[in-house]
Structure formats: structure tokens, C-alpha cells
Image: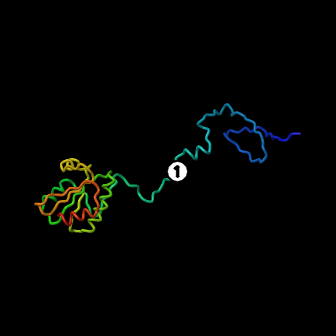
Amino acid sequence: MALFQTQTTPPIHSHGASFKTHSHSPMALPFHPPPPSLPLSLSSIRTHQQDSLFSPPTVKRKFLCRPPHGKHVREDYLVKKVSAEEVQELVKGDRNVPIIVDFFATWCGPCILMAQELEMLAVEYESNVRIVKVDTDDEYEFARDMQVRGLPTLLFISPDSSKEAIRTEGLIPLQMMRDIIDNEM
């Protein structure tokens, strides 16, 4: 008496590479090599897993918003990025309000924080203070001539040409900037 019986099926001669059976009982299928007229190569054997895992997606991805490109510091609304020539024109020209020049770099973390504080300061003082920023990577020679050693560096220029400019290096609090503008300028 056999506890486990196997069914044998007649040999299946097909030119395809795979076949399926839908029987629920266990069965042994005999192996028959492909006919000699059809050479079997590894490139012709494909599985379902290979198709789903390694094939490129056919549907293009759609983004909700375009990913950012390039610089980390965006163009602010009130504090404008200027060139070295524009800063020199501002300083040499007639000025009736204090000028704050922010020397920054796009890769500098404290510069990004300082840019946020300067934006709040520009909103608070409106037209009573002129705040501009200079990218030290774009204006390397100007930053070197101004002896910028650390970032961020702020230069407070008084409307009174007889007063010396005040220089700060590093991240400073908003209240300290207010004190310099109100008391020192």
C-alpha cells in the first residue's frame, strides 16, 4: 500500500519555455529538454521577479513641486543680494540711512540663520535702514579686500561719514543689531 501516489502526465512537447498545471494533487512532471532546433540561452530565460524588480518603471513620476536647484539661500524679499560695485556705490554716495552689509556664503548654516534675522530687521525698520548682502563665493576678491575672515560678517555703516564702520563676525542676536542701529549709528 502506497501512502503517497504520484501522477504521471504524458510528456508535453511545446516550443515555449514554461508551462503550468492547475492540479491540486501532487504530481511529478518529467523533464524533457528542448528540441535541438531551438537553442536555449540564458538571455531567453526570464522570470516574473526579474521583470518586476529590475526593469525600469514605465510610468514617469510627477512631482508636486519642482525640487530645488543650486543654492541653499533663496532670494529674500527685502534684503537684496548685491555685487561689490553696488556696495561701493552705496558707501560712496549720499546716504541718509545706515547701511548694513551682510557677507555670507550659501553653504554656511549660521549665515542662513542670520539671513532670517536680517529679514525680520528689514521688516521692523522698513526704510530707516538699508540692508544688503554680498555672497563671498561670488565676490571673493571684494571679501578678501574687506578682510572678511569669518562668516557671517556684518558691516554697519553710519550715514555720518565721520563715524567709523562697526564690524561683527559670527551669529549675533537680533537685539544686539537693534542696539547698534539705535545707539551707535
Kindly identify the residue that appears in the image at 34 percent across and 51 percent down.
Answer: 70
Which residue lies at the image location 61% right of the left edge and 45% below the top edge?
Answer: 49
Tally of numbered discs: 1
Q: What residue is disc 1 on?
A: 58
The type of colouring in the image is rainbow
Give whichever of 174, 131 is nearer the camera: 174
Picture coordinates of residue 107, whole percent (x, y): 33, 51
Residue 163 on image: x %, y %: 13, 60
- In front of the other: 109 or 142: 109
Q: Quadrant of residue 7?
A: top right
Q: Percent from the top left, x then y, of residue 120?
A: 29, 65
The picture quadrant where one finds residue 165 is: bottom left
The local crowd at label 1, few if under 14, some if 14 to 19, many if 20 or more residues have their Cα within 10 Å, is few
Q: Amino acid at mark 1?
A: Thr
Please give the name of the residue rendered at 86% of the width and 39% of the height, measured from the top-left corner. 2
Q: Quadrant of the N terminus?
A: top right
Residue found at the very far top of the displayed protein: 36
Picture quarter containing residue 16? top right
Q: Where 67 sits versus 33, above or below? A: below
Mark 1 lies on a secondary structure that is: loop
Say which quadrant the C terminus sits in: bottom left
Extreme residue toward the left, this view: 162
As displayed, is residue 70 above or below residue 38? below
Considering only vertical position in the picture, is 94 above or below 20? below
Left or right of 74 in this view: 9: right
Residue 89 position within the rendered picture, expressed as x and y whole percent measured from the top left: 15, 57
